[in-house]
Image (cartoon, grey):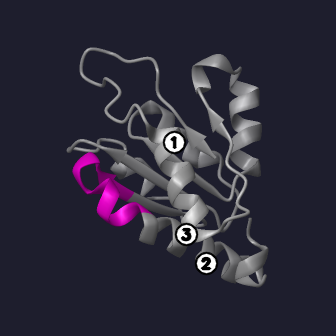
Amino acid sequence: LTLKKSMWGGMNRPHWPGVCEDVSKVAARVRPKLEIDCLDPSELSLQEQIEKTTEATLIVTEHGTVSYLGIFLRDGSSLVSVGQSPLKEAQVLLQLTTAQVFYLTVERVEEELLDVVAQSLDAAAGYLGLPKSEIM
C-alpha cells in the first residue's frame, strides 16, 4: 500500500510527489507480481483508511500524520516512512512491537528503498511462515 500526501500544513508539505510511481518501479524489481495500491488518505473515510491499512503487508508513505496509520498494521507488516529530519512520529511508531518501522530521508530513497522493501517483504513471509514468493 502506498499512501500519497496531497494535503499539507505550513511545516509539513509533501516532499515526495512521485511516491506512487517510485514505489511501483521498486516493487516491480523486488516482486514483479506485487499488488500496489496507491491511495490519498484524504479521499477516504477514517474507517476506509484503517481497513486498507490492516489489509496491507507493507506501507510506504511520507512522514507525518499519515504515518500514524501504522498503529493499525497487522502483525508482521512493515511501515516505511520517508521524509525530512526530524521525523517527529518516530517516538510513537518505534513502540510498535508487532510491525517493523523504517525511516528514510528523501535524499536516500533512491539508494535504500529497494533494500528496505525487499527486507520488509521477506520479514513478513518469515513471520507468517510463508515462502517468500507467496508474499505479493
Work out whether mark 1 precedes mark 3 in sequence or the reverse, and give the earlier one: 1
What's under tag 1, amino acid-wise?
Glu
Q: Which residue is mark 1?
A: 21
**Residue at x 38%, y 40% (from the top left corner):** 63
Residue at image coords 34%, 65%: 112
Reply above or below: 120 against 36: below
Q: Is residue 3 magenta?
A: no
Q: Quadrant of residue 83?
A: top left
Position of 24 with respect to 129 (left or right) is left
Density class for disc 2 (Cα within 10 Å; few <14, some 14-19, many ≥20) is: some
- Label 2: which secondary element: helix
- Label 3 crowd bin: few (<14), some (14–19), many (20+), radius 10 Å: many
**CA distance separating discs 1 and 3:** 19 Å
Local secondary structure at mark 1: helix
Determine which quarter of the picture holds residue 30.
bottom right
Going from N to C along the chain, the mark reached first, 2 or 1, is: 1
Which residue is denoted by mark 2 in the rendering? 122
The magenta segment:
103-113
Which residue appears at 77% of the width and 38% of the height? 51
Q: Is 111 colored magenta in this rendering? A: yes
Nearest to the eye among marks 1 and 3: give it: 1
The secondary element bearing badge 3 is classed as helix
Residue 120 is tagged as 3
Q: Are marks 2 and 3 in contact (CB under 8 Å)?
A: yes
| Image quarter hosting the C terminus | bottom right
